[in-house]
Amino acid sequence: MGKINPIQKIIDKISKSIMFANMPGFIVVALDVNKQIAFMNPNGCFILNNNISPIGKNWFENFIYEPERKKLETEFESSISGKIIQPIEECFVICSNSERKIIRWFHDLLKDGEDIIGVIYFGEDVTSKRNIQLELRHRIAMEQLIAEISTTFLDISQTPDLIEEKILDTLANVGVFVNVDRCSVFLFDKKSKNLENFYEWNAKRVEPSSNKLQELSGKDFSWLSDYVLEHNIIYASKITDLPEKITPLKNILSKKPLKSLLLMPMIKKNYHFGFLSLISEYNEIIWSSQDIKLLQTIADLLSNVFYHNRIQEDKRISQKRLDFFNKVVETSGIGFIMSNFKGEIRYANQALIQLLGYDPSYVLEGKSWKEITSKYYYDILEKQIYPILLQEEIWMGEIPLLGKDGNIIETLINIFLVRNRNNKPIHMAGIITDISEQKKGQIELRESERRFSNLAEKFPLPFAISNKMGKILYINPKFIEMFGYTLEDIPTNEAWMNIAYPDHDYRAKVDEYWKKSKAGVIKPRGNKAVCKNGQIRRVMFREFEIGDDELVAIVEEVKK
C-alpha cells in the first residue's frame, strides 16, 4: 500500500473529533509541518476566506499580518520540533477581502503516534473588543516602518547601486505593509518633465509595469507631472471616483483595470521629483487620513533621498547626512528626540516641543530626560530600556512625558539605536506619538461597559443582545435565571432555536411565527421554550434594534 498523504492524516485526526472541528463561533485551523493548511472549519472559511476552502495554501504567507509573520513562523517551527513557546496569544490575520482581524489563538500539537504531523489552532475573533488597540497597533507598526526607513537612509554617501537596492527594499516593505499590488516611484527630469527613472515593487500576482512604460511617450509623463503637482495627493478608494479627465492616468499606471490608487507627490525645496504610487488591482482599499499622513512622510523620506543624490557633488558627505536627518525629523510632523546614553538630549524637533506645550523658541538640547519625565520612568529608561536597546536595537512602549507647567502627556515612544560608520552605538533616537485621546477613549469605554453591566444586572426582565449575523453577544442574569442557559450554551440564535425548541416540527412553526411577527403580519404571542432543567415555559419575545447592527430581545413569561 502507498503512503498516506500527510494532509489526509491530519484531516483523519480532526474528523475523529467533530466536536472540535465544528466548535460554534471558533476558527479551527490545522497546519502540516510545511506550514500548509490541512484543515479549516466552516466558521474559519466564512470569517477568513469568503467561505472558500484554503486547503494547501501557506498559512503564514496568505493570512498572517506581515509585520508579525516572522515571529509567528519562528514559534511554529519551534512547536513542530516539540517545544510550544506560547500556547495562547493574539495576532493579526488578513482576510481574503483585505480586512484585518485580531484573533486570539490556542494551539497544540497534532501527532501520529509519537510523530508530530502538524499544529492545530483554535481561534476566537476578538476584533470588536480590540478596535482601539487595532488602530493603535497599526499606527505603531507604520511608525516603526518609518523609523526603519529613516535608519536605512541615514548614510546617503553609499554607492548608487546600494541606494537603489535600499529604495527597492523600501517599496517592497511599504507595498506589503499596506497590502497593495504595486508600490512604485516615478522620477521626472527637472527640465523636460519626461520620465527619468522608475522603481517598482509588485506583488507576485501582477506583472511588472516596465514593459508598459516603454510604450508611453514623454507627453504622457509631462501631463502626469503637471497634474500631480497641481493637485497634490490623488486618492481614490474606488477608481470610479476619479474624474473622467484623469483617464490617461490609468493607462500609465497599469495594464489592468484598477480598484484603488494613491499618489503621493515627492517635492522638496519647490523641486518636484515625481511621485510615490500605491495601486490595488484586486481589492478596494480605504486609507484613513492618518494612514495618508504617514505615507506622505515616507514619500518625504524618499524625496530627501533623491534630493541628496542630486546635490552630493556640491556638499560634503557628512553635512549631507546631517541635513537629511534634520529634514526628515523636522518635516515628519511626529515628535522626535535624540540623546546620548547619559540621558542628555542632543536634538528635539519642533513637533516634540509643541507636544510638550512650549513656544517654538524653547530649546531642549542640553537638557536631560529627567526634565521631561518622572523619576520612576527615568529609572526604567536607564536601567531597563538602555540594556534592551543594546541587545535588540529597538524598544517600544508607553512613557508619560512632563510638559510645560508639569502637565502629563500620555505618549507612545518607539526608541532605536543610531550607529556610526563603525557600527558603534552613539545615540538613541525616539519617535514620540501623543496617545492622550486613545487613553481617554479606553477609560470612557471601560466606564460605559461598567454602566451597561450595572443596568443589565438590575434590569427586571430577561433579555438577550445579538447582532444581525445571528451571533448572541450578551444575555443578562435574569435570562440565565429563567432558562438556565449560559452564553456558552447558546452562542448563536440558531443554537438557541435548536436547544429551546428540540422538536423539529414545533421549531419550524416557531420560526415561521417569528418571521411573520417581525414583518408585522401577526401580533406577538407566546411559545413553549424548553429550559436547561427540562421545564417548559410559555414565553413571548419582543425585539428592538439598538444601533446599526444589534438587536435586543426582551422576554416576557405568558401566564395561562
Image (cartoon, helix red, strand yellow):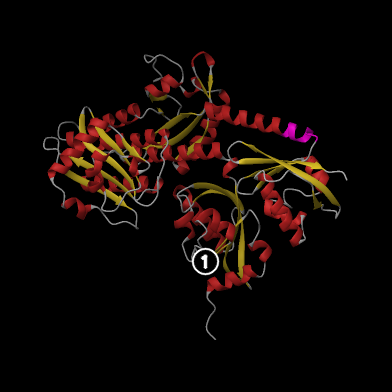
- What residue occupies the far bottom of the structure in this picture? 1
Image quadrant holding the C terminus, namely: top right
Side of 266 relative to 539 (left or right): left
158 relative position to 388: left or right: left
Residue 37, position in %: x, y?
51, 63
Up-down relation of residue 195 to residue 377 (above or below):
below
In reply to whether residue 233 is colored magenta, the answer given is: no
**Where is residue 347 drawn, in percent x and y?**
37, 25
Where 75 sits versus 546, above or below? below
Question: What residue do we see at 47% from left, 49% from top?
Answer: 65
Which residue position is annotated with label 1?
33
Question: Is residue 9 among the parts visible in the rendering?
Answer: yes
| Image position, residue 491 (x, y; %) | 69, 51
Q: Secondary structure at mark 1?
A: loop
Nearer to us in this view, 359 or 443: 443
Q: Which residues are magenta?
A: 453-460
Which quadrant of the rendered structure holds the N terminus? bottom right
